[in-house]
Amino acid sequence: MSEIAIVGAGLIGLASAYELRKRGAEVVVFERDDAGRAASWAAAGMLAPYSEMLDDAALEALCLASLARYPNFAAELAERTGVDPALKLDGTLHLAFDEADAVRLEELAAKTSGARMLGRLEVLEAEPMVSRRAIGALLIEGEGQVDNRRLGRALLGAVRGAGVRVVEQSGEIAVECDARRVLGLRTPHGFRPARVVVNAAGAWAGSLPGAPFSVPVRPKKGQMAALAVPRGFGRRLVWTSEIYLVPRADGRLLVGATVEDAGFDQRVTAQGLATLLGAALRAAPSLGTFTVCETWAGLRPDSPDGRPFIGATPIEGYFVASGHYRNGVLLTPITAELLADTIEGRVPSVDPAPFDPKRAERTEVSWNRTA
């Protein structure tokens, strides 16, 4: 019998399985599609808590704690699996094209550790591909990116190497429980008993069949594109007020991302691409000569208050790790740690209260966000 069953083999589910297995638990992961293919595959891999300009001290603290864990986290996975997640923490460059941009960035610089303003010439030296219309920029040191697709492969290899069974293409999964506690999972191949079930189903977490406790998670669509550029053409993560540009070591430059209320629709649309590419060319006109080599869309798991749900529910043995919205990649290490601590009954290194799934029962947690 598997003691812990995790629903969802995205970055959050796989990292949680890895952490729990390292602590000695017997773990099995169920994924109705392919492991690491939903939001985990569609993301840009940004590790930029200050750049997100989070108006939430508790969430920002969680993001910073997770960022601090990333160097050891990525190095351990690379050593165990031979798959390098390509962690780069060389800073984020925010471009200013007018005085309004400059004022906004100066305000961000004033409250951001490791941030400094750059003049026009410094901007072009820091990132030659950007438009000469840029009048300045804010450089936030210590932020950066990880290749989320490589990270997914590394985590999948690590959990399998540690003895975790990952069941892909499992078909529809349902939670079974009695009035007091969780009993296990019902799959097309029969019942799988488990003393602990973790709902890490991402954008689908709010609609997991049989779930004894409902978390208000809904999908937020994001379309992206990739351009084939010479390696080294882009130096670091670049943000404007419209988009971000993420250079990859393989010669792709990611352009993202739209934010859409479109249910579970994952189509790439002409309007979405026009929005992305138009903003990219305004930021860096030289990109106009390069090929669009890939387009895709993913579904971010959004929550009413912008905070993820991490921890126990009122039903004994039923836990949730979802609702990470734009910060799922960034929050992967700390979510796995916090979830494992909660399951084991340990005192976490970060305050878990702001992310308690049981807050969904309170009337003040409602859909009042527009972002």
Image (cartoon, rainbow, N blue to C red):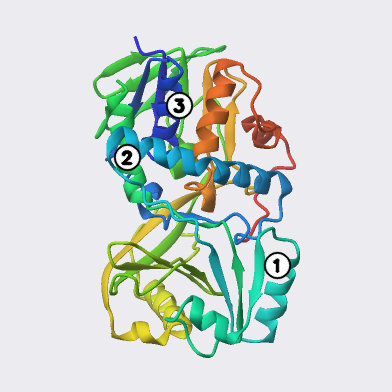
Give the distance between the C-alpha atoms of the residues marked 3 and 2, in whole angstroms.
14 Å
Residue designated by label 3 = 19
Residue designated by label 2 = 154
Q: Dot 3, how many residues are within 10 Å of its Cα: few (below 14), some (14-19), or many (20+)? A: many
Residue 89 vs residue 172: left or right?
A: right
- As shown in the figure, which amino acid type bears the numbered disc 2? Ala
Residue 109: mark in rendering: 1
Q: Dot 1, how many residues are within 10 Å of its Cα: few (below 14), some (14-19), or many (20+)? A: some
- As shown in the figure, which amino acid type bears the numbered disc 3? Glu
Looking at the image, tell me whether mark 3 or mark 2 is earlier in sequence order.
Answer: 3
188 in relation to 84, above or below: above
The spot of residue 154 in percent (x, y) is 32, 39
Residue depicted at 53% across the width and 40% down the height: 69
User: What SS does tag 1 mark?
Assistant: helix
Looking at the image, tell me whether mark 3 or mark 1 is earlier in sequence order.
Answer: 3
Looking at the image, tell me whether mark 2 or mark 1 is earlier in sequence order.
Answer: 1
